[in-house]
Amino acid sequence: MHTTWLRRHNLIADALRQATGITHDETLFQEAKRIVVAELQHIAYNEFLPEVLDNRHMTFFNLRSRTVGHDNTYNPSVDPRTYNAFGAAVLRMGHSLVRNVVGHDNGRGGVRTHLLKDHFEIPDLMFRPPYGYEYMARWMSKAPKSRSDRTIVDGLRNRLFEGPPGPQTGPGETLAFDLGALNVQRGREHGLPPYNVFRRFCGRRPAYHFRGGVAGGLVDHTPQNAARLASVYRYKYKTASASFNLPWLCLGRLTVTKYTLYMSWNLPIILLPPSSQLT
Ligand code: HEM
């Protein structure tokens, strides 16, 4: 993706130079950058966000672009920092979108795919002639992404950065990372607040039990996903402390039902009796 935008930048800078006769490098750089930023934003607001958020939130936060003309709603006094939980949990939902394969498309019907696990830290697919970046970019632009759901593909879950056994490697020793587990651990390391704190933050009632779709419980989970979640907790109806992530609640009901179990991994949950006060 970075290569795509870098090349796009240079293409625009060349076009500007030809169209305007300006040769000052810094001016061309800055003007091309402005156009690239606008294009990135266009894609973010018109293609990515509507896939992630539901209609209500797109409207509530005034995130739609006009079909004609433009808005001038930029507010320089808005604090652009994100919540820690956004990086440590929320946007990691993208890990569910990653496919188990990467590919080449030669534009003449020749498509080859390769397992993701075989290409971590090996950029051959990008640079090795006669294939390379163009073939990959064409494949990526045509191939569907992985469904956004509760699962992460094998290449990320079981084979992330897998290397060959070394001289010190013991039998049965793990030679790869598990991205889902890293996310859970990172959430704990960052001290992300418990599930019910996020529910309150998002204007939802706390959950007091694990029953899916039932008032006072995991109302945003299907019963099947709630049951899966309950199955990994030792104390289901008392005070439990484990991993449970729901900042996606803030993204709206559609998103919540789409991501239900996957998103339920990263944050500590503390389930308390209904009379308890959460701080
Ligand atoms: C092949 C694809 C991908 C791989 C191999 C990958 C791998 C990783 C790894 C290893 C981390 C650090 C985990 C940790 O130790 O905490 C990470 C973090 C992260 N990933 Fe991915 N990821 C991929 C795709 C994505 C996508 C598609 C998105 C979102 C659309 C995403 C969003 C994030 C975010 C927000 C973080 C946390 C960044 C930070 O706080 O610094 N990733 N990813």
Image (spheres, rainbow, N blue to C red):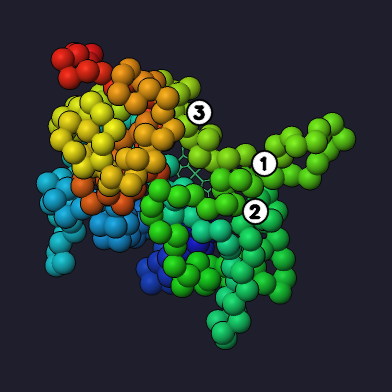
Q: Quadrant of the C terminus?
A: top left
Residue hosting label 1: 176
Residue 240: percent from left, percent from top: 36, 20
Q: Pick whichever of labels 2 and 1 is earlier in the sequence.
A: 2
Q: How crowded is mark 2: few (under 14 residues within 10 Å), some or many (20 or more)?
A: many
x then y, percent, for residue 169: 81, 34
Left or right position of 57 against 126: left
Q: Position of residue 63 (x, y in %)?
A: 19, 51
Residues at marks 3 and 2 touching, judged by CB atoms closer than 8 Å: no
Q: Can you identify the residue that label 2 sits on?
A: 117
Q: Which of marks 1 and 3 is nearer the N terminus?
A: 1
Q: Is mark 3 within 8 Å of ligand 1?
A: yes
Residue placed furthest toward the right: 167
Q: Kindly identify which residue carries mark 3.
A: 185
Residue kind at label 2, given as amino acid type: Lys
Residue type at tag 1: Ala
Residue situated in front as seen by the camera: 188 or 125: 188
Residue at the bottom extreme of this rendering: 108
Residue type at tag 3: Gln
Q: Is mark 2 on a helix, strand or loop?
A: helix
Residue 46 lies, with reference to residue 166, above or below; the image says: below
What SS does tag 1 mark?
loop
